[in-house]
């Protein structure tokens, strides 16, 4: 992959062209290996470093600044990034797809080998031992720790579902919902089949249940009374997709979400403008352009005047038209474009920046 990046110098491409090439080709090269093995951290770091050098056109012959760190660039566009895949999260999501394949496969050779070697029936795949296992299965178990939060169980015969630790009732496991009872319980890994016989809840505790916990115990009995056993095996349901089937995209969206959705940055991608202008406006909104202040932070500012207009003249073609939806007419983004459009008109050689609203 590094050799391919070195061959595609990208010196004749704009930021938009390099971003398109990066997403469509370079980031897709390690996909197959990522679905089989867990990449070490140093390998992910090396690949990200090479892709970063390619995107910012940083070479040994000519050094250029990386205007934004790769952690920010690898966010999804709706979360404030440029949409470049985060290889660490992508590796996890691809390995987690083996969980769905395991449950959909029946009487196939590879599943029988996994069941025999890794004891996946004691009681289910999510509680397999992680010692003495192959690198492939170690990666699957690593991804399963993240994917298990998106799976809930549909109770059949109750042999694979753990009463306390697996999510089969509500939005979390009963160990979380009834933590005071769970910590004093003796059978923390008991399955539903062994815990409930249709009449009695077969749980023992290290000490007598105090009166303040009796209400929780009665609620637990009511939950257990809703269990209806059948002859079918227990099945898993993926909660983050409307079809209830696992998909790499759904898990990637969950693990890539950083908790805060920006207000103005996603609006940049809705504008009908060239891709390189998209990236310029994205850098502008994140305050990542090589202005005098930012150069001063890097310790490289030796000029007395701001170089923003020079940067603008190098990135934007002198004559262009920006089409904005009506809802952006008085927005933050529209005001910024109008302001710097006036600067563009004053640059040597002339030029124009036309802003019109969609009808």
Image (cartoon, helix red, strand yellow):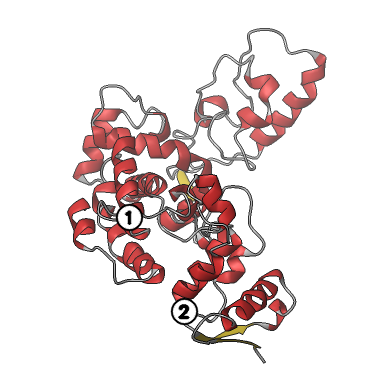
Q: Residue reaching furthest right?
A: 211
In this view, 318 is above or below 240? below
Of the numbered discs 2 and 1, the one sitting upstream in the chain is 1
Disc 1 is placed on an element classified as loop
Dots 2 and 1: beta carbons under 8 Å?
A: no
Tell me the distance, in whole angstroms, between the alpha carbons under discs 2 and 1: 23 Å
Disc 2 is placed on an element classified as loop
Tell me the number on the disc at residue 274: 2
In this view, 49 is above or below 208? below
Tell me, yes or no, if residue 275 can be seen here.
yes
Q: Which residue is mark 1?
A: 58
Q: Residue at x 26, y 52 (%)?
A: 30
Task: Name the image quarter holding the C terminus.
Answer: bottom right
Which picture quadrant has residue 37? Answer: top left
Using a 10 Å C-alpha cutoff, classify the residue at mark 2 as few (fewer than 14 neighbours), some (14 to 19) or many (20 or more): some
Tell me, yes or no, if residue 247 can be seen here.
no
Between residue 292 and residue 193, name the one nearer to us.
292
């Amino acid at each position: 992959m590094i050799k391919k990046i070195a061959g595609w110098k990208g010196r004749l491409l704009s930021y938009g062209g390099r971003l398109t090439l990066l997403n469509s080709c370079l980031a897709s090269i390690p996909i197959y290996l990522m679905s089989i093995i867990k990449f070490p951290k140093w390998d992910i770091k090396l690949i990200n470093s090479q892709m970063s050098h390619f995107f910012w056109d940083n070479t040994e012959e000519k050094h250029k600044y990386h205007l934004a760190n790769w952690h920010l660039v690898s966010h999804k566009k709706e979360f404030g990034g440029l949409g470049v895949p985060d290889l660490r999260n992508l590796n996890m999501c691809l390995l987690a797809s083996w969980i769905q394949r395991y449950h959909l496969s029946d009487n196939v050779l590879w599943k029988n080998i996994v069941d025999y070697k890794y004891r996946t029936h004691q009681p289910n795949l999510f509680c397999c031992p992680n010692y003495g296992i192959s690198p492939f299965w170690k990666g699957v178990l690593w991804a399963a720790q993240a994917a298990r939060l998106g799976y809930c169980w549909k109770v059949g015969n109750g042999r694979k579902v753990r009463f306390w630790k697996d999510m089969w009732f509500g939005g979390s496991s009963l160990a979380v919902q009834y933590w005071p009872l769970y910590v004093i319980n003796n059978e923390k890994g008991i399955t539903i089949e062994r815990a409930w016989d249709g009449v009695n809840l077969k749980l023992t505790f290290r000490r007598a249940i105090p009166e303040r916990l009796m209400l929780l115990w009665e609620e637990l009995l009511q939950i257990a009374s809703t269990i209806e056993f059948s002859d079918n095996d227990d099945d898993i349901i993926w909660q983050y997709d409307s079809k209830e089937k696992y998909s790499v995209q759904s898990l990637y969206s969950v693990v890539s979400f950083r908790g805060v959705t920006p207000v103005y940055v996603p609006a940049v991608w809705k504008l009908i403008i060239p891709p390189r202008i998209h990236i310029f406006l994205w850098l502008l909104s994140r305050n990542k352009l090589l202005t005098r202040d930012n150069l001063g932070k890097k310790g490289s500012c030796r000029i007395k005047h701001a170089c923003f207009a020079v940067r603008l003249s190098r990135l934007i073609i002198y004559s262009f038209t920006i089409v904005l939806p009506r809802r952006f007419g008085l927005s933050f983004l529209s005001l910024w474009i109008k302001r710097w459009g006036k600067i563009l008109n004053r640059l040597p050689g002339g030029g124009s920046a036309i802003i019109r609203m969609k009808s």
